[in-house]
Amino acid sequence: MKDLADHLFDILENSVKAAATEVKIILGIKDKLFFCKIEDDGSGIKDEDVTDPFVTSRKTRKVGLGLPLLKRAAESTGGSLQIYNSEKRGVILEFKIDIAHIDAKPFGDIARTFVDAIYSWPKVSFDIFIQKKNNKKLSIFNSKKIREIVSYSEMQQKEVRDFIYDSIDRELKKIKIDSQFGMF
Ligand SMILES: Nc1ncnc2c1ncn2[C@@H]1O[C@H](COP(=O)(O)OP(=O)(O)OP(=O)(O)O)[C@@H](O)[C@H]1O
Ligand SMILES: [Mg+2]
């Protein structure tokens, strides 16, 4: 995985593979670290260490690489990754990463990752928030709400797809995240 946006796609895919129907994503910057918290309502993890490469529910290959690689990428910049079961149902995953660190991976295009996820898994509701400096969460996108007002055929139009991309990109810029260049 070449950049952070690829990793983000991988963890969204993990939630989908665990049969999540709602995935809440909170993004922000705290103490100069980029952080991302994901809460899903999927099956949850067993009590084994899923950040170990040999723990995987994959059938095609015996090692899962997504989480161990993201954990290593985060830690190599002084950040961290935790994944645990929520008290309700599903998983909470949090990672922090210093994207300005010399060893950090490129940021990649985060808005593109979200658009790809929204279109790849239309039945899953992705609810995206940014966390402001005062710790308030601001909803920037909710795929369930969009689907209530935009028809399936309208969703397929390039203008609509671009509009969704631009609106996520614009909101991320408010917390000084450029979806292609990272923090500014
Ligand atoms: N959100 C989640 N809900 C439930 N289980 C999860 C979740 N995320 C990860 N897991 C479990 O952790 C394992 C490891 O995840 P990881 O992303 O590292 O590898 P993978 O998805 O199995 O393979 P890869 O990412 O290399 O395609 C998964 O196989 C799955 O069993
Ligand atoms: Mg994975």
Image (cartoon, rainbow, N blue to C red):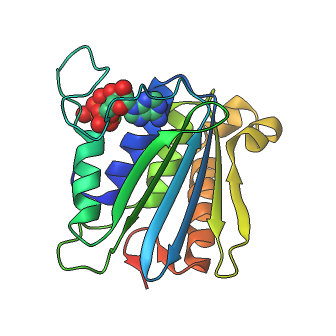
Q: How many marks?
A: 0
Query: In what quadrant of the picture does the C terminus appear?
Result: bottom left
The relative height of residue 160 versus residue 55 in the rendered view (above or below) is below
Spot occupied by residue 88 in the image (x, y as percentages of width and height): 67, 34
Spot occupied by residue 125 in the image (x, y as percentages of width and height): 66, 36
Spot occupied by residue 50 in the image (x, y as percentages of width and height): 32, 35
The relative height of residue 30 versus residue 75 in the rendered view (above or below) is below
Instruction: Locate residue 64: give its quadrant.
Output: top left
Quadrant of the displayed image that contains ligand 1: top left
Q: Residue at x 59, y 58 (%)?
A: 26
The relative height of residue 163 versus residue 88 in the rendered view (above or below) is below
- Pick the front one: 151 or 19: 19
Instruction: Locate residue 76: give its quadrant.
Output: bottom left
Instruction: Locate residue 45: give its quadrant.
Output: top left
- Pick the front one: 32 or 84: 84
Q: Residue at x 28, y 53 (%)?
A: 71
Q: Residue furthest bottom?
A: 184
Is 18 placed left or right of 138 in the picture? left
Q: Residue at x 24, y 45 (%)?
A: 68
Q: Residue at x 45, y 25 (%)?
A: 17
Is 31 placed left or right of 55 in the picture? right
The relative height of residue 5 versus residue 96 in the rendered view (above or below) is above
- Pick the front one: 181 or 11: 11
Spot occupied by residue 157 in the image (x, y as percentages of width and height): 61, 41
